[in-house]
Image (tube, rainbow, N blue to C red):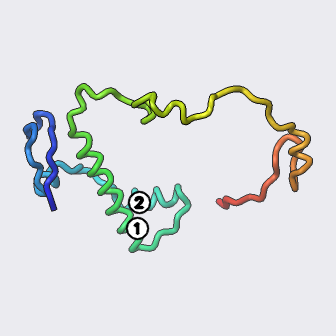
């Protein structure tokens, strides 16, 4: 595996230094995702994880956090923050339709075609059980 070349701040790394897997491991987060964290996230997401899935999820979440920690080490001085990749260039602006107000569908007509409605909203079967 080829080592990554990163230009980083003066926090132990030198610009253009090769970051070896051992050095990368040393920069990883010390506080990671615990088994209890995985259980809580699974509960919030209404997931039933097996013990093996829980272990794999913990490993994957910690790998994501380690990667984010690695990205946080990059020197972004002079890089303009973006809210969207669309801000990079106006070259693709013509690919999007114009954002203009148009007439909407008539609510009475649409609701009359619905299997069930309250007159203002569609009635749908409950799909989330708590």
Q: Do the residues labelled 2 and 1 touch (CB within 8 Å)?
A: yes
List x then y, in percent, for residue 9: 14, 34
The quarter of the displayed image where residue 94 is located: top right
Image height of 56 relative to 10, above or below: below
List x then y, in percent, for residue 63: 29, 57
Image height of 105 relative to 130, above or below: above
Residue located 14% across and 58% down the image: 2
Mark 1 burial class by Cα count in 10 Å: few <14, some 14-19, many 20+: some
Mark 2 burial class by Cα count in 10 Å: few <14, some 14-19, many 20+: many
Disc 2, SS: helix
Residue located 10% across and 37% down the image: 15
User: Which residue in the structure is indicated by mark 2?
Assistant: 38
Residue located 82% across and 44% down the image: 121
Image height of 99 relative to 60, above or below: above
Classify residue 40 as left or right of residue 6: right
Q: In which quarter of the image is the C terminus?
A: bottom right
Q: For the residues marked 2 and 1, what is the alpha-carbon distance in whole angstroms?
A: 7 Å
Q: How many labels does the image show?
A: 2
Q: Nearer the viewer, residue 42 or 9?
A: 9
The quarter of the displayed image where residue 98 is located: top right
User: Which residue in the structure is indicated by mark 1?
Assistant: 54
Disc 1, SS: helix
Q: In which quarter of the image is the N terminus?
A: bottom left
Q: Nearer the viewer, residue 2 or 118?
A: 2
């Amino acid at each position: 595996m080829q080592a990554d070349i990163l230009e980083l701040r003066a926090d132990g790394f030198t610009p253009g230094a090769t970051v070896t897997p051992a050095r990368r491991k040393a920069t990883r987060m010390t506080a990671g995702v615990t088994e209890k964290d995985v259980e809580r996230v699974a509960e919030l997401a209404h997931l039933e994880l097996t013990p093996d899935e829980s272990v794999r999820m913990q490993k994957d979440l910690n790998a994501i956090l380690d990667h984010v920690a690695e990205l946080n080490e990059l020197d972004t001085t002079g890089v303009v923050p973006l809210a969207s990749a669309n801000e990079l260039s106006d070259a693709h602006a013509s690919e999007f339709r114009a954002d203009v107000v148009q007439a909407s569908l008539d609510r009475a007509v649409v609701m009359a075609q619905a299997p069930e409605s309250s007159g203002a909203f569609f009635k749908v079967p409950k799909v989330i059980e708590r």
